[in-house]
Amino acid sequence: MNTWLIKNAKVITPDGVIEGGSVWIQDGEIRQAGEVREHAAKEGQVFDANGAYVMPGIIDIHTDAMEAEIVPRTGADIPIAVAFNELERKMCTCGITTVFHSLHLGYEHAEELSRSKYSREEVFGEVARAAAGPTLIHNKIHLRFEVCGVSAYDQCLDLIRNGYVDLLSVMDHTPGQGQIRKEYYKKFLLAQGRNEEETAQLIEERVAWPKVEGQRLQMMVDTAKAHGIPVASHDDDTIEKVDSMLAMGVDISEFPINMETAAYATRMGMHVAGGASNVLRGGSLSGNLDMTAAIRERVVGILCSDYYPAAILHSVFKLHFEHGMPLNESVSLATLHPAESVGLDTETGSIERGKHADLLVVNLRDRLPVVSRVMVGGKWVLQTDTK
């Protein structure tokens, strides 16, 4: 029997923060939280949190970190198994206990930039194999399908049908819509050394690329839904786009471009996700929606790391200390709400009886959160206690 009593903690539940609280864990599950008599866990071990915060493990539904770990520099391929193992340890220190590794497919521009020797089939296969083996945290795959990747359409369906995919998102990086404004894309191409004529021609070509749309896109979404896989749209920039995604059965709106779109998606019942790096940095890199403002307006309900895994935990506490958000509410942006969006909320995402004991012990240093311990399924997988 694996029994733990975490005591003398600030326990963060969906309803509030319990000062001097405890969490009783038995056989990998939370049995009780709040005021727990120490004799209840007499057969197990006791951990004194010494006033630290105890919160649910973070659930990150969108992070590009695996791609960057495999190819940290253009053309510099790291063995995928090594990248997976090292990234898990980094994720632990960031407080992430469930991660959806976002792997692109059909995104030729990203493949050109990375110049990786690995095929997309190799990346998906190796990450899936590693995720199925002994791991520190819960690892899942988020397939990001680029609608211009017409030649990758059948491969996407095969990956879904063969059980490689836990979350599907539909992306469109065509210049002139979403976050890829033509002016922004033009500056990017010019900075690569192209002249005005080459840049204009390349933009024209990419705008004219064929896309997976209509019935074929609907079939992809339907295939995912038939396999119990939630589906997200990406960079929604108009109400009309939200309506089209809803009509196809899409559940999640990732990184909406403006307040109007985020508010509409929320009103229509979608789970709306924004980048924690946007919150941590104080705004969007490309001049789009300010996620802090959107969260305060309650039109964005999920934080994901996007490109910087450490951003989620820091954003949770920044929203509390600098913007006055109740800590239980800011924590839910990174735990319970993402769990709800992908159908994991009956298993994890909050400190409640019967859920998996995926927990963090967090201390503050000058108001900066530092993860000192991580528990996954009732087992300590990280301990970094310092004086």
Image (spheres, helix red, strand yellow):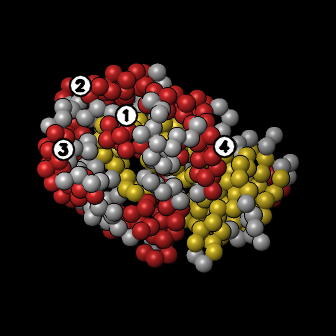
**Residue 247: which quarter of the image?**
top left
Query: Mark 4 is on which residue type?
Result: Leu
Dividing the image into 4 quarters, which one contains the C terminus?
A: bottom right
Q: Residue at x 67, y 54 (%)?
A: 374
Give the position of the N terminus as an image quadrant: top right
Is 275 drawn above or below residue 220 in the view shown?
Answer: below
Q: Nearer the viewer, residue 352 or 88?
A: 88
Please report contact status of discs 3 and 2: CB closer than 8 Å, yes or no. Answer: no
x, y (%) of residue 141? 48, 36
Q: Secondary structure at mark 1?
A: strand
Q: Amino acid at mark 3?
A: Leu
Spatial separation of the CA atoms under disc 1 and disc 3: 21 Å
Q: Earlier in the sequence, mark 1 or mark 4?
A: 1
Residue 263 placement: quadrant: bottom left
- In front of the other: 354 or 10: 10
Which residue matches tag 2?
216
Q: Earlier in the sequence, mark 2 or mark 4?
A: 4
* Tag nearer the camera, 1 or 2: 1
Whichever of callouts 3 and 4 sits on the residue coming sooner in the sequence is 4
Question: Which residue occupies 66% across, 68% down?
Answer: 363
First of labels 3, 2 by sequence position = 3
Q: What's the distance in space between the residues labelled 2 and 4, CA to CA?
A: 38 Å
* Residue 202: mark: 3
Which sits earlier in the primary sequence, circle 1 or circle 3? 1
Residue that label 1 marks: 105
Residue bearing mark 4: 136
Compared across the picture, whether 125 is left or right of 276 comes to right
Q: Nearer the viewer, residue 201 or 63?
A: 201
The residue lying toward the viewer, choosing from 35 and 248, is 248
